[in-house]
Amino acid sequence: MPALRRGLAVLRLLASRPGPLSAVAVARELGLPRSTTYHLLAELTAAGFATHFPEERRYGLGVAAFELGSAYLRHDPLERLARPLLRRLVDTVGRTAHLGVLHGAEALYLVREQPRQPTTIVSDVGVRLPSHLTASGRAMLARLPAAQVRALFPGPFVDRTGRGPRNLPALRRLLAVERRRGWAVEDGYVTAGFASVAAPVFDHGQRPIAAITVTFRHVCEAECGETWPELAAEARRAADELTGRIGGRG
């Protein structure tokens, strides 16, 4: 069991870095003896989970790791784990709930659960919307590095209803507020007469990989400044549980 844990730690370390690592760096990062590190890397390489680059004297992930990751995605694990949580959330709050992920500068909706008397809304499964306008998108953007957010929005900002951030400085100010608050709010930014609250879901590296959103009817002539903390608390509870189910850390 200790050997298995160490081997998995090596794989996780290799996966977390943008390029290959030397055996010395792996040993240092994980606090392992060099002999143990070389043995683990040799076994992982033989099994195809690591690749040795002899000219660089470094190691990276192998094809078997890619195949394993691809198989994981084919099983739709995030959607399968989220669906019962969304169903429970809908039963609790009586509003529509979504699971969304970032797809470039857009929010992509993967799962939608509705109450017994649903309302027609634009955020259906497979729909993509500008992430800076959606609560789900900004719940994730608020936890990304500033440089990454800047790279996602190099040009003009899409506007749907005349509300929401219209440039990068305005988006940054809004993200800072929502990061401190712990959830994102959208009040008629996507569709007039509807509002949403969303909370982020994190992976094992504390990176935002998804968001859970509650959407509901709300008519306001201008932005009302509402944050709906009670609904947000339920969305956060579901997001935190999904984070735990995938082995993430918030």
Image (cartoon, grey):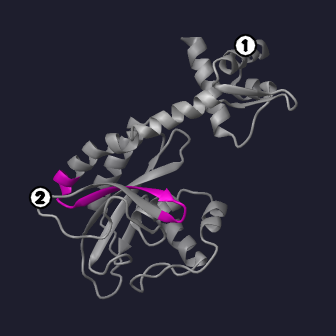
Q: Residue at x 45, y 79 (%)?
A: 164
- Residue 181 can be seen, yes or no: no
Does residue 36 lie above or below 203 as drawn? Answer: above
197 within the magenta span? no
- Residue 90 can be seen, yes or no: yes
Count the numbered circles shown.
Answer: 2
Q: Please state the horizontal and vertical placement of residue 91, each as a whole percent of the image.
A: 16, 52
Nearest to the observer: residue 156 or residue 223? 156
The outermost residue toward the left is 116
Residue type marked 1: His
Q: Residue at x 32, y 47 (%)?
A: 238
Q: Secondary structure at mark 1?
A: helix
Is residue 238 found left or right of 131 in the rendered image?
Answer: left
Residue designated by label 2: 116
Few, some or many C-alpha atoms within 10 Å of disc 2 (few <14, some 14-19, many ≥20)?
Answer: few
Q: Residue at x 49, y 61 (%)?
A: 179
Q: Quadrant of residue 157?
A: bottom right
Find the distance from the CA under tag 1 to the CA under tag 2.
Answer: 57 Å
Q: Secondary structure at mark 2?
A: loop
94 within the magenta span? yes
Q: Please state the horizontal and vertical placement of residue 7, each as a whole percent of the image.
A: 62, 20
Residue type marked 2: Arg
Q: Residue at x 34, y 69 (%)?
A: 227
Res 39 label: 1
Is residue 220 found left or right of 109 in the rendered image?
Answer: left
Which portion, as a residue range, is magenta?
90-106
Q: Quadrant of residue 12?
A: top right
Does residue 44 lie above or below 182 as drawn? Answer: above
Res 15 label: none
